[in-house]
Image (cartoon, helix red, strand yellow):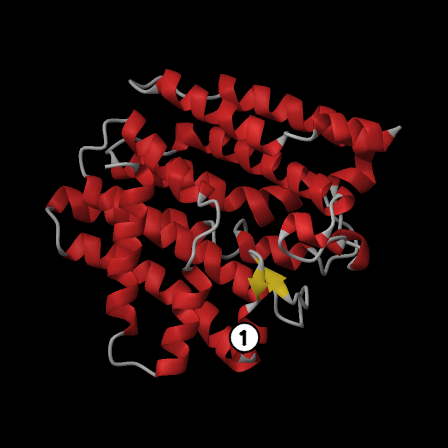
Amino acid sequence: MSFSARLDAATAAVLARAMEGGPSQLARALHYAVTPGGARIRPTILLSVASACGDDRPHLSDAAAVALELIHCASLVHDDLPCFDDADTRRGKATVHKAFSQPLAVLTGDSLIVLAFDILAAAAQDGSHSDVQRALSMVRVLAARTGMPMGICAGQGWESESSINLSAYHRAKTGALFIAATQMGAIAAGQEPDQWEELGARIGEAFQVADDLRDALYDADALGKPAGQDAIHARPNAVAELGVQGAVSRLQDILGGAISSIPRCQGEATLAQMVRRYAEKMTPALPQLNAAAR
């Protein structure tokens, strides 16, 4: 079964359980926030790492992948609220607070966070002693990369500081869930997570630099969400700090480093191919960006 099919099946099962018997509007908002999925880069990376490490507990890696994606979806719902980005669209459709109201959007994000950890708890409860240990380790990683001091909440919090280290900001705001992806994938397959941190951090930083470039140079129709948000909200970003050409060069350097940071494993070559594919997806318009810089 493909990674996409595994994610679809596992996500559908989780949503079906979560929506049963609860308030209908909130249930609809949960489903709306998660489906149809976006690129699902983070859970795909998680499954790719698990596969490269043997994937001897696919039910654990599936649970981890869905939990990670739900945290990401929750962050998008909260980011789009008027107190943050005040965005009208996400993934080419109305944001949750526009479609369902602000109170339901807050509850949707909160519910998705709780559901993510419940998925991992259920995976521990239903498995062997080894499964329990792996699931608990994944809970710790996901919690660390979601909250303070180095998770996505911390990343959002950096925007309220008067002085910001761009690398630390990117590592928390965007890199955190990519680090969670590589580390949780390794844990699900019974491997030590520490050596997988650098790969996740580099992919996350590359993704953020690419996002900074898109936000600065593309319009809302191309993005499927509001454009120019970094400038509007005076956020630190790679284009403002390095310029377009500098940001493009930085992106290429990061992606090259990501490939060289892949730990030795049975699927090392496959992971390198995955990073190269993401590099192509993140940089399809480099000639246009270079022209824009001129």
Q: Quadrant of the C terminus?
A: top right
Q: Quadrant of residue 159?
A: bottom right
User: Which residue in the structure is indicated by mark 1?
Assistant: 99
Q: Residue at x 74, y 25 (%)?
A: 287
- Is residue 285 shown above or below 65? above
Residue 194 as seen in the image, left or right of residue 53:
right
Query: Of 193 and 10, which appears nearest the observer?
Result: 10
Residue toward you, 261 or 89 = 89
Q: Nearer the viewer, residue 164 or 15?
A: 15
Q: What is the three-letter code of the residue carrying label 1? A: Ala
Question: 50 left or right of 39?
Answer: left
Q: Residue furthest front?
A: 221
Residue 138 in view of the camera: no
Residue at (39% x, 39% y) in the render = 44
State the image coordinates of residue 286 (x, y, percent, origin top left).
71, 27
Q: Residue at x 58, y 55 (%)?
A: 154
Horizontal side of residue 105 vs 238, given as left or right: left
Please report the residue visible at 40 percent of the width from the left and 23 percent of the height from the top: 271
The answer to whether any part of residue 288 appears in the image is yes
